[in-house]
Amino acid sequence: MAALLEVADLNVTLNTARGPAHALRQVSFAMQRGD
């Protein structure tokens, strides 16, 4: 069965007064119906 939601290599960087803050680096996951 195909995943209901699939995320691959997600990166999130927040700009702060002290410079960039890497909140997420290369996060991948999949969710099936009912998870």
Image (cartoon, grey):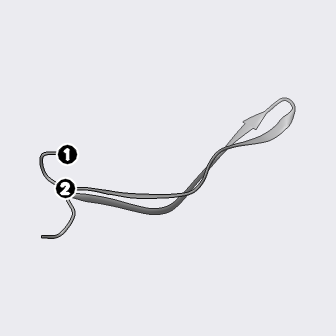
Give the quadrant of the C terminus.
top left
In this rendering, position of residue 31 left or right of residue 18: left
In this rendering, position of residue 2 left or right of residue 9: left
Q: Which residue is mark 1?
A: 35
Mark 1 residue type: Asp
Count of marks placed on residues = 2
* Mark 2 neighbour class, 10 Å CA radius: few under 14, some 14 to 19, many 20 or more: few
Q: In the displayed structure, would residue 16 be above or below residue 30?
A: above
Q: In the displayed structure, would residue 9 be above or below residue 11?
A: below
The image shows residue 24 at horizontal and vertical percentages of 60, 47
Disc 2 secondary structure class: loop
Mark 2 residue type: Gln
At 13% from the left and 52% from the top, the residue drawn is 33
Q: In the displayed structure, would residue 3 be above or below residue 12?
A: below
The quarter of the picture where residue 29 lies is: bottom left
Q: Which mark is residue 32?
A: 2
Please state which of residues 32 and 5 is positioned toward the viewer in this rendering.
32
The image shows residue 5 at horizontal and vertical percentages of 27, 57
* Mark 1 neighbour class, 10 Å CA radius: few under 14, some 14 to 19, many 20 or more: few
Disc 1 secondary structure class: loop
At 21% from the left and 63% from the top, the residue drawn is 3
